[in-house]
Image (cartoon, coloured by chain):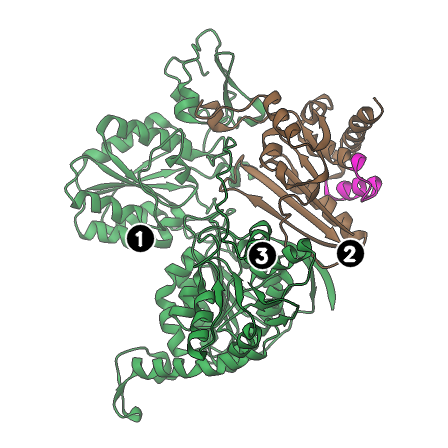
């Protein structure tokens, strides 16, 4: 058994916490686990790719190679596009559709592509997955910082590699108790956003 | 043995603590920084942030001479800064175990340059280097390095790459060893005084030549050690094309082998010097080998040398002759190389990828550097001056939209380069922009040189009281060191004592900063402007900020959408929406600097 997950996002979106919750859960389940982050020369507001790899055998490299990831969680659409080639042909993605504009796009040095352009490029790869507006869902729950928890909930709805309740329990163990109620709501909202598409 | 999930840097610190290390010294630098912090958390270890890597190495080496195991920690640029000491301590040898951590950053993901410090440490200084392929191996190598360092009386180096330092994995570990050795310093001038002294016992030879011979004679002992080292091994398989994985290159090779789905003849090499017999055993009967190493062809050239000396003939392919010469290895690159080499084809020239809008580095919203950068930009736009830059968060002022500093080289270069431009006859004002940690690292001597040589420049020191870029490590201008509260060395007082004319401003007050820099420019000689404001990100958490926070609003009636605030200022909290500037409240930290930038007065 071997499972590779990557989380593509922007610094500050909580991808590290999300990847740690999954990594620790995998360890509790007895798997061998390695992880790392790929960051450009861009610490603040930069592009961040978290790699989580677990298996019941030896894992050599901490980095998920191109074409190998089972799941890509795109916390931001442009970042999802940047790393989409990491997914394997049978892999699945969940992409948060809410864009975080780049500084250069704000300054009109670059053009941030439209949602249609990004999704068309993703679709052209012939991969399958789900689109959710996790940022809006987090705002609806009163806090944009819940975006990563919504994505984590969505992850457990598209993959049964780790039990959903174990992932949630692990996440709650990593955050202050006063956030638990909101986290549970966000996690469930993330699960439901996928289930609605599965059955809808 | 216990098993725990650790980051590479944590595992390296753990192994050092288990080896009974007493003194650890370093200067912050990605990807090595966290090693020192972790070491500081162990009881019985004295850990410090030295002002630069050379001094860190000197502190650690002196502890070794005093019979205590020690470690010096740095990134590759730091090893360059420490190269002078390296080229002396190699000849003297050491006493208690001494390990040098020289962390490389292939691909320069978080660095000013891409380089391979194995060349500096092994090819140049003739010292042994371990190149780990995994976090567990980095841990094991540290423990072996302490034993071998004492056995050979030589510094042992660990050269991890970012994918080791910043990777997490399951590590088997044991307990911290409490080693109580007497802290005795035995004077031995024939070793520890490196000088052109005549040695009577050696027939009147000069000591540097004698010590050089001593180091050369050590090489046979090192080669024998590496022949036995478990870090190198052969994995036999069918085929006449062999693959050699060095350090992290072995990890990518093994993963590529898994994906390829067939066992390949593999030699794992993780030590310098190389185990020559093992190399010869592996290559005998092969028609071709491909070598994967980060990042220069170090092992490749050594193997070519072995083959030349032993009159063995085969194709030796690697970074020099087959693979891309620059950049990081990846599993995919190794896969491509395996397939091409087996098919007797050249490594393919891959098409350039499509540009996806980048996320460039910038200052945080609320950062005092943004106020300083915009003030300096206003000054040089008026007078046509040039700004030389230095390393630190402010270096993002070279990118869009500020595009202020004209040069970035290495730690402390800004000041000598600024007056070099003047020495060449450049008539307009020249400014050096340097941070406080960098000033204490390697700026002091440059400032002394400028003052001594009667330069006419303005040095601007961004004094935010921390080494922010690498995660807020303290420095001599901070209120603390790694262990205690201290009286900060104020850079302005230091510069004044050296003879500079010192000016002061708060960069959050852009108007005042423009005025002060303009005044300083008008003076003759070396002027130092201290732009003092605490790092918002570090000290703001504890409620210490150097501005009066205010909620800035855009008056949509006044804003004409000119976009100057976005195009020239670049605060991530300001965006243009439907032809009007808007401030994203969740991203704004209320520093109010943008109020100055909007000349129409729409920011209130």
Q: Which residue is mark 2?
A: A56
Q: Are marks 3 and 2 in contact (CB under 8 Å)?
A: no
- Closer to the camera, B250 or B158? B250
Residue B42 visible in the displayed image: no
Quarter that holds the C terminus of chain A: top right
Specify whether residue A168 is painted magenta: yes
Q: Residues within 10 Å of mark 3 (few under 14, many from 20)?
A: many
| Residue B444, disc | 1
Specify whether residue B501 is painted magenta: no
**Relative to B214, A97 lies left or right:** right
Q: Which residue is mark 3?
A: B338
The mark lying in front, picked from 3 and 2, is: 3
Residue farthest to the front, as pictured: B344
Task: Classify residue A191 by image quadrant.
Answer: top right
Q: Confirm whether circles 3 and 2 share one chain.
A: no
Q: Is residue B500 above or below residue A192?
A: below
Q: Secondary structure at mark 1?
A: helix
* Figure colour of chain A: brown
**Percent coordinates x, y for residue B392 in the rendering:** 42, 44
Query: Which one of the lettered chains is coloured green?
Result: B
**Percent coordinates x, y for residue B553 in the rendering:** 50, 16
Question: Magenta region: which residues?
Answer: A156-175
Residue drawn 51% across the image and 77% down it: B276
Residue drawn 67% across the image and 26% down it: A135
Q: Is residue A22 above or below residue B508?
A: below
Q: Is residue B487 above or below residue A76?
A: below
For disc 2, the chain is: A
The mark lying in front, picked from 1 and 2, is: 2
The mark lying in front, picked from 1 and 3, is: 3
For disc 1, the chain is: B
């Amino acid at each position: 058994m071997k499972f590779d997950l990557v989380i593509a996002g922007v610094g500050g979106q909580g991808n590290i916490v999300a990847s740690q919750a999954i990594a620790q859960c995998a360890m509790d389940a007895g798997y061998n686990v390695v992880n790392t982050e790929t960051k450009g020369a861009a610490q603040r507001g930069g592009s961040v790719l978290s790699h989580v790899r677990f298996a019941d055998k030896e894992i050599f490299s901490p980095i998920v190679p191109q074409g190998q990831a089972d799941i890509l969680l795109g916390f931001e659409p442009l970042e999802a596009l940047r790393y989409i080639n990491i997914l394997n042909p049978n892999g699945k993605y969940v992409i948060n559709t809410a864009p975080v504009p780049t500084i250069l796009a704000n300054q009109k040095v670059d053009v941030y592509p439209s949602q249609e352009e990004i999704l068309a490029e993703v679709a052209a790869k012939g991969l399958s997955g789900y689109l959710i507006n996790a940022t809006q869902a987090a705002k609806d729950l009163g806090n944009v910082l819940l975006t990563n928890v919504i994505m984590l909930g969505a992850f457990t709805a598209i993959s049964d590699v780790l039990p959903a309740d174990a992932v949630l329990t692990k996440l709650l163990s990593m955050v202050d108790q006063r956030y638990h109620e909101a986290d549970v709501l966000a996690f469930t909202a993330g699960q439901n956003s996928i289930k609605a598409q599965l059955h809808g | 043995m216990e098993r725990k999930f650790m980051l590479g840097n944590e595992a390296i610190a753990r192994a050092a603590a288990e080896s009974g290390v007493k003194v650890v010294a370093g200067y912050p630098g990605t990807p090595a920084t966290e090693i020192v912090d972790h070491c500081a958390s162990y009881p019985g270890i004295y850990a410090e942030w030295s002002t630069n890597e050379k001094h860190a190495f000197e502190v650690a080496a002196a502890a070794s001479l005093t019979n205590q195991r020690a470690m010096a920690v740095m990134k590759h640029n730091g090893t360059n800064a420490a190269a002078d000491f390296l080229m002396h301590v190699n000849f003297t040898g050491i006493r208690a175990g001494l390990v040098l951590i020289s962390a490389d950053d292939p691909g320069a993901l978080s660095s000013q340059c891409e380089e391979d410090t194995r060349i500096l440490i092994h090819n140049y200084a003739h010292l042994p280097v371990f190149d780990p392929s995994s976090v567990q191996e980095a841990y094991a190598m540290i423990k072996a390095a302490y034993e071998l360092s004492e056995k050979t009386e030589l510094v042992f180096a660990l050269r991890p790459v970012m994918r080791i330092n910043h990777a997490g994995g399951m590590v088997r570990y044991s307990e911290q060893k409490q080693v109580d050795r007497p802290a005795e310093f035995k004077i031995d001038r024939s070793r520890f005084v490196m000088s052109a002294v005549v040695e009577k016992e050696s027939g009147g030879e000069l000591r540097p030549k004698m010590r050089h011979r001593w180091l050369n004679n050590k090489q046979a002992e090192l080669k024998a050690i590496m022949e036995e080292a478990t870090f190198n091994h052969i994995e036999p398989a069918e085929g006449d094309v062999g693959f050699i994985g060095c350090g992290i290159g072995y990890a990518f090779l093994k993963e590529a082998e898994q994906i390829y789905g067939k066992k390949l003849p593999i030699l794992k090499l993780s030590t310098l010097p190389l185990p020559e017999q093992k190399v010869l055993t592996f290559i005998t009967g092969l028609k071709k080998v491909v070598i994967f190493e980060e990042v220069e062809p170090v092992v490749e050239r050594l193997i070519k040398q072995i083959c030349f000396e032993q009159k063995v003939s085969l194709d030796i392919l690697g970074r020099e002759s087959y693979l891309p010469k620059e950049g990081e290895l990846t599993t995919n690159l190794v896969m491509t190389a395996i397939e091409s080499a087996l098919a007797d084809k050249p490594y393919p020239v891959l098409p350039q990828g499509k540009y996806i809008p980048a996320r460039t580095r910038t200052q945080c919203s609320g950062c005092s550097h943004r106020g300083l950068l915009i003030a300096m930009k206003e000054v040089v736009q008026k007078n046509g001056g040039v700004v030389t830059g230095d390393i630190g968060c402010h270096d993002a002022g070279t990118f869009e939209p500020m595009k202020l500093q004209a040069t970035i080289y290495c730690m402390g270069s800004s000041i000598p380069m600024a007056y070099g431009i003047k020495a060449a006859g450049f008539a307009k004002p020249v400014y050096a922009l340097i941070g406080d940690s960098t000033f204490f690292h390697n700026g002091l001597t440059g400032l002394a040189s400028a003052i001594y040589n009667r330069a006419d420049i303005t040095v601007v020191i961004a004094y935010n009281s921390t080494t922010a870029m690498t995660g807020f490590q303290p420095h001599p201008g901070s209120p603390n060191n790694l262990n205690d509260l201290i009286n900060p060395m104020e850079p302005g007082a230091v510069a004044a004592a050296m003879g500079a004319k010192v000016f002061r401003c708060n960069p959050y007050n852009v108007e005042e900063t423009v005025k002060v820099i303009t005044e300083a420019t008008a003076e003759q000689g070396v002027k130092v402007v201290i732009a003092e404001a605490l790092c918002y990100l570090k000290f703001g958490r504890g409620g210490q900020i150097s501005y009066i926070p205010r909620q800035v609003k855009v008056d949509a009636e006044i804003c004409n959408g000119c976009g100057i605030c976005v195009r020239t200022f670049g605060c991530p909290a300001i965006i243009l929406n439907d032809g009007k500037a808007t401030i994203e409240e969740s991203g704004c930290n209320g520093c109010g600097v943008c109020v100055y930038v909007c000349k129409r007065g729409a920011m209130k």
